[in-house]
Image (cartoon, rainbow, N blue to C red):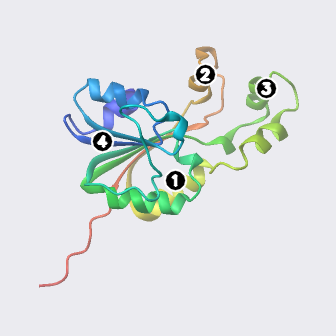
Amino acid sequence: MDFIDDHLPPGPARVLDAGCGDGALADRLRARGYEVTAIDIDPDLARPGVRIADICGFRDDPYDAVIFSLSLHHVADLDAALDSTGALLRPGGRLLLDEFAHECADESIADRFYAAPGSLPRWRERHREYHAGTAMVEAVARRFAITSLARVPYLHRYLEDASLRDAESVLGLQLVAEPRPTARPPT
């Protein structure tokens, strides 16, 4: 939450939580006074406060911020998802990306994750269908002005094991971007 708290505009900003999963982040943001729309593609996650929708085709009034928290690497069409995101952000809005750069894992991380030596091939096979962190950053950079990008520990959050925080390779990335200003026609 620190990353999101540090970069969201003040409440009651209008926020889209894209790929919200169980909606826990959206619920926390609503409790803090944000107007949140939470969407996820998985129909099993439907509940009050979570709409079933695909970011690639989602249309709505403009948002002050769009958040992808561990969800963008799952989308089928990265370009379509980011094009839709651009259309959903108001001028001056913010894209917040708290993601997983699985390609940065090394043998020690894979071996620890699977509790077995020689696990890096297994790690790579398990994650091959997901977008790499570098691909997500490049796709964002083609459409938005990146104002902040940091590599951060990730696996300790996923495994809920704080002992991994300092030992893991840096698998996470946190990115803030804004829509590029549109050129005004000459007068």
Which mark is first along the chain, 4 or 1?
4
Q: Name the residue under label 4.
A: 15
Q: In which quarter of the image is residue 143?
A: bottom left
Which residue is the site of mark 3? 114
- Give the spatial CA distance, label 2 vs label 4: 32 Å
Q: Which mark is residue 137?
A: 1
| Residue 50, position as x, y percentages in the image | 40, 36
Give the image location of residue 44, x and y in percent: 54, 35
Q: Could you say whether the residue bearing mark 4 is in a helix, strand or loop?
A: strand
Q: Nearer the viewer, mark 2 or mark 3?
A: 3
Disc 1/disc 3 C-alpha distance (Å):
27 Å
Q: Which of marks 1 and 3 is in front?
A: 3
Which mark's residue is nearer the viewer, 4 or 3?
4
Q: Distance between the residues labelled 1 and 4?
A: 21 Å
| Residue 104: image tag | none
Name the N-terminal-most of marks 2 and 3: 3
Q: Quadrant of residue 155?
A: top right
What's under tag 2, amino acid-wise?
Answer: Asp
Label at residue 166: 2
SS at badge 1: helix
Image coords of residue 11 (percent x, y): 20, 34
Quarter of the image with the N terminus is top left
Q: What residue type is labelled 3?
A: Tyr
Residue sticking out furthest to the right: 118
Left or right? Give the position of 44 relative to 61: right
Which sits earlier in the primary sequence, circle 1 or circle 2?
1
Rounded to the nearest angstrom, the CA distance separating label 1 from label 2 is 24 Å
Please tell me whether mark 1 or mark 4 is closer to you in this view: 4
Q: Which residue appears at 32% of the width and 63% of the height?
A: 180
